[in-house]
Amino acid sequence: MKAAVLIESKKPMPIMELDQTEPKTGEVRVKMSAAGICASDHHVMTGDNPAPMPIVLGHEGAGVIDAVGPGVTTVKVGDRCVLSFVPNCGHCRSCREGLSNICDTNRLTGTRQYDGTFRLHTSDGTEVHQFAKLGVFAEYIVVPQQACYPIPDDVPMEVAALIGCSVTTGVGGVINQPGMRAGMTVAVIGAGGVGLNALQGARLMNASKVIAVDIFDSKLEFAYKFGATHVINSKEQDPIGAIQEMTDGGVDFAFDTFGHKITTEQAYKATRKGGTAVVVGLAPDGMNAEIPLVELVRNQKTLVGSYYGSSSPHETFAKLLEFYRQGRIDVGGMVTRKYKLDEINEAYEALERGEDGRGVIVFD
């Protein structure tokens, strides 16, 4: 089968023919239907977040179960599924505590399957990693059954793909936050795919003000469609001062959906006394933010990380699919560009340019 393979950072991904072994116990093979173009994969491509290579990237996707291995009980051949990039083990400490989105076993095994081995190989026998055990930039993928969440027939595959990452990360990161209540003020720093969904999450929670911050006017204009009530171009004005002025001292919740020292510090400083700054976006590996510790105590602020919606991905999938089918969130409207697999490098060039919305690879 064909896949886009990252062989070296900062270099284009060639489309290669790879050998794929059959699903083992508890595993399934998925014929890919749609895969989202996400910045998290781009961080690996640029070397900001190192990963073992060669590797098939892609962690936001949806497809149809094509084959099942021994012992598979949760899905069957023909099921249409959204894919979770944290296919949790169900028995580690994090899973037992209800934090399956940060499953210990999944983290330890990384880009290998749960038995520590590979399912992809080049023609000369070189083992190929699968990003987040998925690697959805491929025609077929072999993954743990836990990665698959069946979806109704009326949910388009492009929508399901985005629910697999950006919608769950953005909307889930807002609605699953403890202390989030109707009428609160919210700022979202970064109006990319995850940021647009954080705006939708704030709208779902009936926030009184939803402020989008970005450096591109076109993205800020696009943000109004997904729940922003106010926008700030942080290249043209200080976002901290502007947010404080709009909200009489700062927002209740500020979300950094971009992931950088600058944006995290902005989110923290834009919150009011007693407010919460939530870091959703992944910063480059090794980057740190400067947080004034005295103010953290005196103003009783909270700084928290949110990974993959802050809760069980499958539980969040269920909520989001209902919200989508009820017309309460717009997912299809975020898809502004469609590509074939062999156009994947062009897709990431568009992401680098900061083009609006989400790009999606559509498979035949």
Image: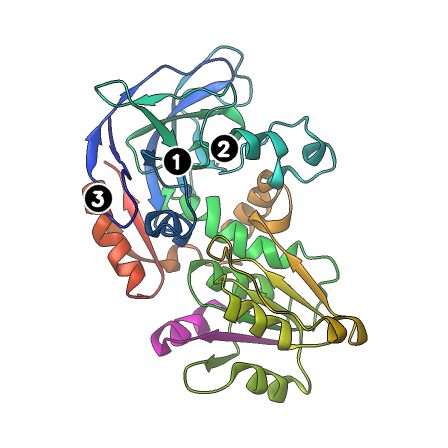
Seen in the picture, residue 52 relative to 286 is either above or below; the reply is above
How crowded pointer 3 is (Cα within 10 Å; few <14, some 14-19, many 20+) is rated as: some
- Camera-near label (2 vs 1) is 1
Quadrant of residue 280 within the rendered picture? bottom right
Q: How is the image coloured?
A: rainbow
Q: Position of residue 150 (x, y in %)?
A: 49, 32
The vertical placement of 330 against 153, above or below, is below
Q: Amino acid at mark 2?
A: Gly
Which quadrant is home to the N terminus?
Answer: top left
Q: Which residues are magenta?
A: 208-227
Nearest the eye: 9 or 114: 9
- Camera-near label (3 vs 2) is 2
- Nearest the eye: 37 or 230: 37
Please say whether residue 128 is visible from this viewpoint.
yes
Name the residue that disc number 3 marks: 340
Task: Please rate how many residues cluster around mark 2, counting C-alpha atoms within 10 Å: few if below 14, some from 14 to 19, many from 20.
Answer: some
Select label 3 or label 1 by which is in front: 1
* Pointer 2 residue: 110
Q: Quadrant of residue 112?
A: top left
Q: Amino acid at mark 3?
A: Lys
Q: Are marks 2 and 1 in contact (CB under 8 Å)?
A: yes
**Answer yes or no: do the residues labelled 3 and 2 have beta carbons within 8 Å?**
no
Mark 2–mark 1 distance (CA, rounded to whole Å):
10 Å
Q: Residue at x 53, y 50 (%)?
A: 168
Q: Earlier in the sequence, mark 3 or mark 2?
A: 2
Report x, y in % for residue 88: 59, 31
Secondary structure of the residue carrying tag 1 is loop
Residue at mark 3 to residue at mark 1: CA–CA distance = 25 Å
User: Tag 2's secondary structure?
Assistant: loop
Task: Identify the residue position indicated by label 1 in the image.
Answer: 52
